[in-house]
Structure formats: structure tokens, C-alpha cells
Image (cartoon, grey):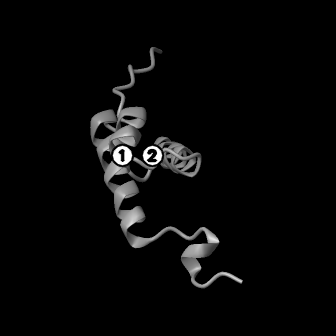
Amino acid sequence: MPNSIYDRGVLKPTEIAKLKRVFDEACRVGHIEPETSRARDTALTILALYNAGMVDEQSLREATCIERPAKSA
């Protein structure tokens, strides 16, 4: 039986803060409004990378803070 909620895969406050910093930077660099589907996709990507083992903040930034070209009409 797990000793704490963190043993069950729940993110710690420090991890949440790290992921939020990466998300905020990705939104800023990508000109993404936080309450959009694009922001949701960005957040899910960051979480997927983190859950896959990319836990270093700089690596997450490099993987997600890419200026995306504007879609052409």
C-alpha cells in the first residue's frame, strides 16, 4: 500500500509549478491564448512528455517552446 498520495502517481506541488512554467512559456512563445484548444493540446503534450520521463525543465521547454508557423488559408 502506498505511503502517500505521491506514491500513487499524483504530481507534487513542485512538479506542477515546473509544468506550469513550461506551459506559460510555450503559450507566450507560441502566441497561444491559455483558454483555447491549442493551449489544451500544448498542456497535454507537456504532460505526456513528462510522464514519458522527460522531467528536466529545460528539456521540456526545448521540446514545447517552438514558434509554430501561422497556418495558411
Which residue, given by chain and number where applicable, does mark 2 sit on? 39
In the picture as drawn, the residue positioned furthest to the top comes out as 72
The residue located at (36%, 29%) in the rendering is: 66
For the residues marked 2 and 1, what is the alpha-carbon distance in whole angstroms? 7 Å
CB atoms of marks 2 and 1 within 8 Å: yes
User: Which label's residue is closer to the chain start, 2 or 1?
Assistant: 1
Q: Nearer the viewer, residue 72 or 9?
A: 9
The 10 Å Cα crowd at callout 2, few under 14, some 14 to 19, many 20 or more, is some
Work out which quarter of the rendered image holds the N terminus and state it: bottom right
Where 70 falls versus 25 (above or below)? above
Amino acid type at mark 2: Ala
User: Residue 72, located in which quarter of the rendered image?
Assistant: top left
Q: Which structural element holds mark 2?
A: helix
Residue visible at 45% across and 71% down in the picture: 12
Q: Where residue 35 sits in the image (x, y, percent)? A: 42, 53
Residue 62, how many percent across, how many down? Answer: 36, 33
Q: Amino acid at mark 1?
A: Glu
Report how many numbered discs are placed on residues in the image: 2
The correct choice, above or below, for 36 with respect to 20 in the image is above
Residue 67 position (above or below residue 8): above
* Quadrant position of residue 17: bottom left
**Which residue is identified by label 1?**
33
